[in-house]
């Protein structure tokens, strides 16, 4: 098997570490671009200026950009600016660096979010027929994708990853949801009918691997083919954790709770109904399509 050099910008966080572990196991060489280098394969960058880190791109086969201030915070004006700037500036500077390379990466995958689509209970949003929405998070996603799409690369294929909530062992949304459930607060949130698009961390990594090995390009919804509902998600989580009951959370309680813990209630109130049409049409096989199996695999060990 050919081994590749993979550079992950913003790869020190939850998803970067999922990808680093997955690709390392296959024998690939990984570099991480980070503002706080700690390990031998970490390289310093400030995510907005050209600097020494650019040299690494000449020996990179696959570039993945995950950089972005977490949206799990209050949407103050200062936080909104950081959420926007961290995504757009990192994308723009990577574009400049790629275009300065004599030997640029063969493929560049840039993160986006499946939150780019309108809230939807009934209509299933695919890459071809999905309705793009118009609120703060949706507009961030649009600007992020426009910045990426406007960068012309002659020798580098480009891929947009419209990723849903990734369920994983060591980070992301599952960690606080598990804690709530263990405290007996894991009932339905609001009316519980909100659709939840999700993907298991293993399928997230496998989907990226698939896109690269199949030489694909364009926009991909990185979501499992079977969105669940909030009520079912919480029920499955209680079952996986062996917690017999969960107090339901009303909308006002969620808004109050979100304020107290410094986040936004939209993260659980929105209805996300997104399908991975492009992955499926290209023949990708998911390991986890059932939320019960996905959750029990993640909370078991
Ligand atoms: N987790 C999910 O379920 C999910 C779903 C859809 C989309 N996404 C998107 O995927 C990306 C990665 O998610 P994640 O869960 O791995 O996030 P994460 O754990 O918060 O990691 C994000 C990375 O971005 C860098 N970063 C954070 N704030 C920054 C800033 N102000 N300026 C420059 N760099 C900054 C950090 O690197 P350093 O601090 O090391 O520089 C960090 O490693 C994010 O853009 C997120 O919005 C995540």
Image: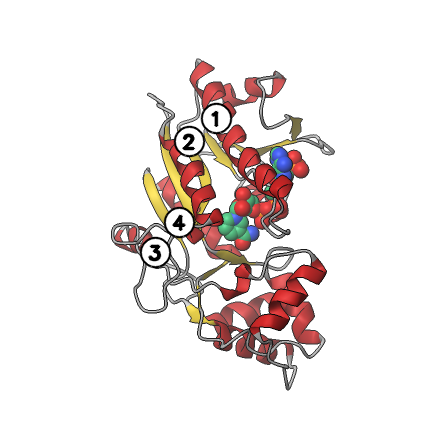
Q: Is residue 127 left or right of residue 230?
A: left
CB within 8 Å, label 1 to label 2: yes
- x%, y% of residue 137? 48, 48
**Residue bearing mark 1:** 92
Residue at the disc numbered 3: 276
Would residue 112 be found to the left or right of residue 40 on screen? Answer: left
Q: Residue 31, position in %: x, y?
A: 59, 31
Whole-number angstrom distance, CA of label 4 to CA of label 1: 23 Å
Q: Earlier in the sequence, mark 1 or mark 2?
A: 1
Query: At 49% across and 76% down in the image, what residue appears?
Result: 192
In this view, the residue in front, 69 or 174, is 69
Q: Is residue 57 above or below residue 161?
A: above
Report if the CB atoms under discs 2 and 3 are less than 8 Å apart.
no
Q: How is the image coloured?
A: secondary structure
Q: Is residue 288 left or right of residue 186?
A: left
Marks 3 and 1, how far apart in space? 27 Å
What residue would you read off at disc 4? 134
x then y, percent, for residue 232: 48, 77
Q: Nearer the viewer, mark 2 or mark 3?
A: 2
Residue 147: which numbered mark, if any? 2
Mark 2 Cα shell of 10 Å, populated few (<14), some (14-19), many (≥20): some
Residue 11 visible in rendering: no
Q: Hey, which residue is sitting farthest bottom in the picture?
A: 244
Residue count near mark 1 (Cα–Cα under 10 Å), binned few <14, some 14–19, many ≥20: some
Of the 4 image quadrants, the one containing the N terminus is: top left
- Badge nearest the viewer, 2 or 4: 4
| Element on which disc 4 rests | loop
């Amino acid at each position: 098997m050919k081994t590749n050099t993979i550079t992950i910008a913003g790869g020190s966080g939850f998803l970067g570490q999922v990808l680093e572990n997955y690709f390392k196991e296959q024998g690939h060489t990984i570099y991480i671009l980070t503002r706080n280098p700690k390990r031998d394969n970490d390289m310093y960058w400030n995510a907005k200026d050209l600097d020494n880190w650019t040299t690494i791109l000449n020996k990179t086969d696959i570039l993945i950009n995950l950089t972005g201030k977490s949206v799990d915070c209050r949407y103050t004006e200062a936080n909104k600016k950081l959420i926007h700037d961290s995504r757009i500036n990192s994308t723009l500077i990577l574009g400049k660096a790629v275009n300065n390379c004599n030997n640029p990466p063969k493929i560049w995958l840039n993160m986006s979010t499946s939150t780019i689509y309108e809230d939807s209970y009934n209509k299933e949003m695919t890459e071809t027929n999905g309705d793009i929405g118009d609120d703060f998070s949706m507009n961030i996603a649009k600007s992020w994708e426009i910045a990426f799409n406007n960068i012309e690369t002659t020798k580098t294929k480009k891929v947009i990853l419209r990723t849903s909530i990734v369920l994983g062992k060591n980070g992301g949304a599952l960690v606080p949801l598990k804690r709530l459930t263990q405290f007996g607060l894991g009932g339905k949130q609001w009316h519980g009918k909100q659709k939840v698009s999700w993907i298991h961390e293993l399928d997230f990594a496998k989907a990226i691997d698939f896109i690269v090995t199949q030489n694909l390009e364009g926009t991909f919804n990185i979501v499992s083919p079977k969105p669940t509902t909030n009520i079912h998600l919480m029920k499955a989580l209680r079952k996986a954790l062996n917690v017999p009951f969960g107090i339901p959370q009303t909308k006002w309680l969620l808004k109050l709770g979100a304020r107290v813990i410094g986040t936004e209630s939209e993260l659980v109130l929105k209805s996300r109904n997104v399908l991975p049409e492009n992955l499926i049409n290209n023949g990708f096989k998911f390991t986890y399509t059932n939320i019960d199996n996905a959750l029990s695999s993640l909370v078991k060990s």
